[in-house]
Every structure is written in C-alpha cells, then in structure tokens.
Amino acid sequence: MMRQLHKKVGAFFVVGVILCGPAVAAEPSYDKYKSWLVVCDNGLKCEAKGFENGTINNPDLRFVRAAGPDAATEVTLSVPFPVGLGGFLADGKPLRLGPSWTRSQDEDLTTISTKDPVAVKEFLSELRNDAKIEVGDDKAVIPLDGMVAALLHMDDRQGRIGGVTALIKAGAAPASKVPAPPALPVINRRKIDIILSDAEKQRLITQAMSAGKALFDSEGCEADAANGGLNADAYPLDMDHALVLIPCIMGAYQGSSLVFLQPLKGNGVPIPFQPRLPLGEGEGATTLFVEPGFDTDTGSLQMSGRGRGVADCGLSAQWVWDDAEFKLAEAYFQGSCGGSQPVDWPTLFRSR
C-alpha cells in the first residue's frame, strides 16, 4: 500500500538550505535517526518525534520549534491513555515534570507539554543519556535512541549550533546570530463558479481515458478500480482548463487515481499532472494520487494516503489552482508507522 502513497518514498535527506536571512525559501527535509524522525518544512519550522516503530497506539515524545532567534521549543508527551505527571520513568527512575508542565485530557489522549526554556533544558539534561521513557502502569515505551542526533539536526537546520539558543551543542553566540525564518509562499485560493453539465464531464473523462491508455498500462491500473468507491470525475479550473480524475488502483482501505489537466473545450490533448513533492533528492514524480478530491470553494486538489489502516503513517498534500497552474500549498508526511494518534503527520510544506 505504501506504493500508492508515493513511488520510491525512502531515502530522505537535506538537499540544501539558505541560512542567511531573511531567506526567500528553504528546502524541506525528512530525516531518520534510529527511533526518531525529524522534519523541517519550507519555513524551517522543525519537529523531532520519537516512538516505537510499528506499534499501535503507543506514547510519543516530540520537540517542535519555529525558525528565528526568538522561537521557543515546545516539548510534548502524547499518551493514548490517562496518565498523570508522575506516571513517567526514565531508565527506571522517576522523570521529574515540574509546575511549568501542563496536562490536558481529550477522551483517552493525555497531552503533557511545556514551552518554558528552563524546563526544556532540565528535561533534556535528564534524558540525553537515557535509553527509554516508560509510561503508566503497563510501562509503555518511548525510545530515546536517536533523540540527541535528531535535535542536533534541528539545531543545524535552524542555524543554532554554537549559540545560546541551541538545544544540543550550545555556545556563546548570541541569539541575534540565528537566521530569520524563511518567507512562505503566498497562494491565492479562490472559488470556482463554473458548472459543467454531465455531458461535458463525460466528454472530458472519455478524452482523458483515451489519451492516457499507455499510462494506465504502465501504472498497472485495474479495469474495475471504479467499483471500489473511487469515481471518475471532471472539474472546471477556469474558462480554459479542466481537471480530470481517473480511478487506477483500489486497495483494501483506499484507492488511487491518475490526474489529468486538459483544455476545457475542444479536443486538446490531456496532460498527466505529475508534480514532485519535496521528499528528497532522487524521489520521482507523483503519478498516483491516493484518495484524491477537488474542492471548488478553494480551487484545491487534495490527496491523503495512509501507510497502514490505522493511519499512523502516511502522506497528504494539497495543490491550489493559481494563475493557470497548480501550486503546492501544503504537505504532511510520516514514513515510520506508530505514535499516539492517527493522521498526526509532521508538516513538510506550508503556505500562506
């Protein structure tokens, strides 16, 4: 099923980053250090997250920090069952969570967090040489192997190493030396008021299916994919362009479609829409869109694919039709399955 999320999702690493600012853009990155992942988006907001890979409904620990000299680090323990502040052990010893930590309960999900710089420093000092955190009476595990490396990478991407704001390799450099956050792209969302008749939709679908036959064959599309809940559909984008979705593969709990852009009128040739997501050098174009949909209120094409049925790993993205082309507006990704809750995937790309 991961094939449907993205072909060749695998080796993620930093392609490059502008660290003198304010930067115009930053390259998103996804990196893995043993039991920890760290994701930095195009605005250099980073999230480091640790959990037992492959488990279901297990606690996780994360550090989230925006770019820039004044950005605070938020540390969050997320636990999928009720637990108090005193319910944590670090390598068998009680983990001290002081008064600056706050606890909230949403049904079975317990969230314990702090943004206090002193509390964050004490927490890291206590944990950086430990192997694991145990939570609750059943001693559910949050592994710590890879945590220091992930946080060091976060510091590096945000230009903090050797300075007073670094989490791991701090030094004497003042906070003013930390680069400003990169600018986020501006996306113009707009409602599409054009309405197609059923006959116009069918004409566009037929054109796409005829023009895309070779692509259907190369992608291994199934003739009965539409019987599993995915439907072929066509949408106007503006007075000159249309979007067409053609079902390709239907799995046990989700399906994938091919996406075409084509002239709204006449017999122009449909062109497959195959954007590249910021998943690292060597990653190919996105050819299959998992559970795609189009929102005419915002002019946005969405996809969201789960790596497994419980949705604790996966990839989702949104593109907005802006100025006669689709522009990436947001993307979320988590390659390792696990953690405390479904569809809780780190941000890889965002816009404003």
Image (cartoon, rainbow, N blue to C red):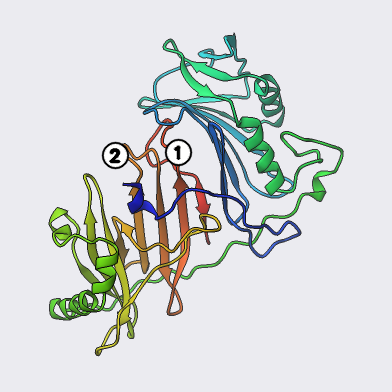
Residue 193 point in image, percent of width and height: 29, 76
Front-lying residue, 96 or 222 = 222
> What's the residue type where badge 1 is placed?
Ser
> What's the residue type where badge 2 is placed?
Gly
Label number found at residue 336:
1
**Residue 147, quarter of picture:** top right
Residue 231 point in image, percent of width and height: 18, 62
Please determine whether, in this image, residue 302 is positioned above or below residue 306.
below
Residue 242 point in image, percent of width and height: 30, 78
Label number found at residue 309:
2
Q: Residue at x 54, y 12 (%)?
A: 86
**Residue 341, quarter of picture:** top left
Front-lying residue, 151 or 192 = 151
- Binning the other alpha carbons within 10 Å of mark 2 as few (below 14), some (14 to 19) or many (20 upward) gives some
Q: Residue at x 71, y 45 (%)?
A: 156
Q: Residue furthest bottom?
A: 266
Label number found at residue 90:
none
Q: Residue at x 57, y 9 (%)?
A: 92
The mark nearer the N terminus, 1 or 2, is 2
- Binning the other alpha carbons within 10 Å of mark 1 as few (below 14), some (14 to 19) or many (20 upward) gives some
For this view, does 26 lie left or right of residue 70? left
Residue 20 point in image, percent of width and height: 76, 59
Q: Secondary structure at mark 2?
A: loop
Please determine whether, in this image, residue 308 is positioned above or below residue 315.
above
For this view, does 199 lie left or right of residue 90? left
Front-lying residue, 347 or 52 = 52
For this view, does 306 lie left or right of residue 60? left
Q: Residue at x 47, y 58 (%)?
A: 330
Structural distance between the alpha carbons of marks 1 and 2: 14 Å
